[in-house]
Amino acid sequence: MAEADGATAAPRPDPDPDGVAWIEPPLCTKCGVLVRIYPTNYDRWVSLAMVELPAKDVPEAFRWRLARVPGRSPIPTDIVAVRVRGIDPLPSEPVVPAHRMMCIPEWGEP
Ligand SMILES: [Zn+2]
Protein backbone atom coordinates (compact mmCIF):
# COMPACT_ATOMS: atom_id res chain seq x y z
CA MET A 1 0.00 0.00 0.00
CA ALA A 2 1.26 3.40 -0.81
CA GLU A 3 1.31 5.93 1.91
CA ALA A 4 -2.10 7.07 2.87
CA ASP A 5 -3.70 9.51 0.59
CA GLY A 6 -2.34 12.85 -0.24
CA ALA A 7 1.00 12.94 1.50
CA THR A 8 2.66 14.34 -1.57
CA ALA A 9 5.76 16.41 -1.32
CA ALA A 10 4.85 19.31 -3.54
CA PRO A 11 2.27 21.76 -2.32
CA ARG A 12 -0.24 22.50 -4.97
CA PRO A 13 -1.70 25.96 -5.31
CA ASP A 14 -5.40 26.04 -5.68
CA PRO A 15 -6.00 25.67 -9.42
CA ASP A 16 -9.44 27.23 -9.21
CA PRO A 17 -9.24 30.44 -11.26
CA ASP A 18 -12.11 31.88 -9.31
CA GLY A 19 -10.50 31.06 -6.02
CA VAL A 20 -9.81 34.32 -4.29
CA ALA A 21 -9.71 32.87 -0.82
CA TRP A 22 -5.98 33.31 -0.71
CA ILE A 23 -3.47 34.29 -3.34
CA GLU A 24 -0.29 33.98 -1.38
CA PRO A 25 1.16 30.59 -0.72
CA PRO A 26 -0.11 29.44 2.62
CA LEU A 27 2.79 30.12 4.91
CA CYS A 28 2.52 30.21 8.63
CA THR A 29 2.81 33.79 9.72
CA LYS A 30 4.56 32.72 12.88
CA CYS A 31 7.27 30.39 11.73
CA GLY A 32 7.12 30.71 7.95
CA VAL A 33 6.77 27.10 7.01
CA LEU A 34 4.34 25.87 4.43
CA VAL A 35 1.03 24.87 5.81
CA ARG A 36 -2.18 23.60 4.36
CA ILE A 37 -5.14 25.77 5.03
CA TYR A 38 -8.49 24.12 4.88
CA PRO A 39 -11.97 25.14 5.75
CA THR A 40 -13.50 23.20 8.54
CA ASN A 41 -17.00 21.91 8.67
CA TYR A 42 -17.98 24.77 10.92
CA ASP A 43 -16.93 27.86 8.95
CA ARG A 44 -13.51 28.32 10.39
CA TRP A 45 -10.21 27.78 8.69
CA VAL A 46 -7.39 25.80 10.07
CA SER A 47 -3.71 25.51 9.28
CA LEU A 48 -2.66 21.94 9.07
CA ALA A 49 0.77 20.44 8.90
CA MET A 50 2.00 19.23 5.55
CA VAL A 51 2.54 15.77 6.90
CA GLU A 52 0.49 13.14 8.57
CA LEU A 53 1.52 11.57 11.82
CA PRO A 54 0.42 8.47 13.62
CA ALA A 55 -2.36 9.31 16.02
CA LYS A 56 -0.24 8.30 18.98
CA ASP A 57 2.13 11.17 18.25
CA VAL A 58 -0.56 13.78 18.04
CA PRO A 59 -2.37 15.05 21.10
CA GLU A 60 -6.07 14.62 20.76
CA ALA A 61 -6.73 18.34 20.52
CA PHE A 62 -4.64 18.64 17.38
CA ARG A 63 -5.94 15.69 15.42
CA TRP A 64 -7.56 16.48 12.13
CA ARG A 65 -8.57 14.55 9.15
CA LEU A 66 -9.33 15.70 5.64
CA ALA A 67 -12.67 14.77 4.23
CA ARG A 68 -14.23 15.27 0.87
CA VAL A 69 -17.58 16.89 0.80
CA PRO A 70 -20.09 16.52 -1.99
CA GLY A 71 -19.89 19.56 -4.23
CA ARG A 72 -22.69 21.50 -2.66
CA SER A 73 -20.53 23.41 -0.26
CA PRO A 74 -20.43 27.18 -0.77
CA ILE A 75 -16.74 27.01 -0.01
CA PRO A 76 -14.66 26.78 -3.20
CA THR A 77 -13.05 23.50 -2.34
CA ASP A 78 -14.18 20.00 -1.90
CA ILE A 79 -11.96 19.24 1.02
CA VAL A 80 -12.78 20.13 4.56
CA ALA A 81 -10.83 19.54 7.71
CA VAL A 82 -12.67 17.60 10.33
CA ARG A 83 -11.57 17.30 13.90
CA VAL A 84 -10.94 13.76 14.94
CA ARG A 85 -13.03 13.49 18.02
CA GLY A 86 -15.45 11.05 19.40
CA ILE A 87 -13.66 8.32 17.55
CA ASP A 88 -10.61 6.69 18.93
CA PRO A 89 -8.09 6.34 16.14
CA LEU A 90 -5.70 3.45 16.23
CA PRO A 91 -2.30 4.52 17.55
CA SER A 92 -0.80 3.94 14.12
CA GLU A 93 -3.59 5.54 12.19
CA PRO A 94 -2.40 8.63 10.33
CA VAL A 95 -3.97 11.90 11.28
CA VAL A 96 -3.17 15.39 10.13
CA PRO A 97 -1.85 17.44 13.00
CA ALA A 98 -2.84 21.04 13.28
CA HIS A 99 0.12 23.17 12.38
CA ARG A 100 -0.12 24.78 15.80
CA MET A 101 1.23 21.63 17.28
CA MET A 102 4.44 21.92 15.29
CA CYS A 103 4.77 25.65 15.15
CA ILE A 104 8.07 26.52 16.72
CA PRO A 105 8.19 30.28 16.66
CA GLU A 106 8.03 32.86 19.36
CA TRP A 107 4.57 31.70 20.21
CA GLY A 108 4.61 33.48 23.52
CA GLU A 109 6.63 30.78 25.15
CA PRO A 110 9.55 32.03 27.15
ZN1 LIG B 1 3.98 28.08 12.38
Image: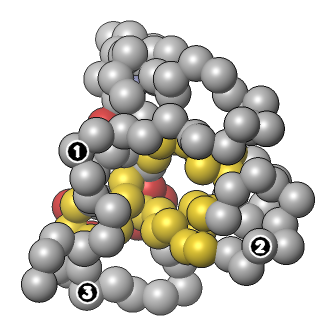
Where residue 27 appears, as percent x and y from the top left, is 46, 22
The correct choice, above or below, for 33 with respect to 58 in the image is: above
Q: Nearer the viewer, residue 38 or 98?
A: 38
Reading the image, the residue beneath label 1 is 9
Whichever of callouts 3 and 2 sits on the residue coming sooner in the sequence is: 2
Which amino acid, by three-letter code, is at mark 2? Answer: Gly
- Asked whether 103 or 52 is in front, the reply is 52
**Along the line of sight, the residue nearer the viewer: 101 or 18:** 18
Give percent across and percent down for residue 74: 88, 59
Q: Which residue is farthest left?
A: 1
Q: Which residue is depicted at the point 50% across and 74% down?
A: 84
Measure the alpha-carbon separation of dots 2 and 1: 26 Å
Q: Quadrant of the N terminus?
A: bottom left
Q: Position of residue 66 (x, y in %)?
A: 50, 67
Q: Nearer the viewer, mark 3 or mark 2?
A: 2
Residue 90 point in image, percent of width and height: 25, 87
Quarter of image, ligand 1? top left
Q: Which residue does the numbered mark 2 point to in the structure image?
A: 71
Residue type, mark 3 in image = Leu
Between discs 1 and 3, the one toward the N terminus: 1
- Is ligand 1 within 8 Å of the beta carbon of the residue shown at mark 2? no
Q: Is residue 41 visible?
A: yes
Please report the residue visible at 33 percent of the width from the left and 45 percent of the height from the top: 50
Q: Is residue 101 visible?
A: no
* Mark 3 CB near ligand 1 (8 Å cut): no
Mark number, residue 90: 3
Check disc 1 and give the amino acid type: Ala
Q: In screen coordinates, is 67 left or right of 42? A: left
Query: Which element type, helix, strand or loop, lies under badge 3?
Result: loop
Residue under the image location 55 percent in, 73 percent down:
67
Q: Tell me the tag on residue 51.
A: none
Q: CA distance from mark 1 to mark 3?
A: 25 Å
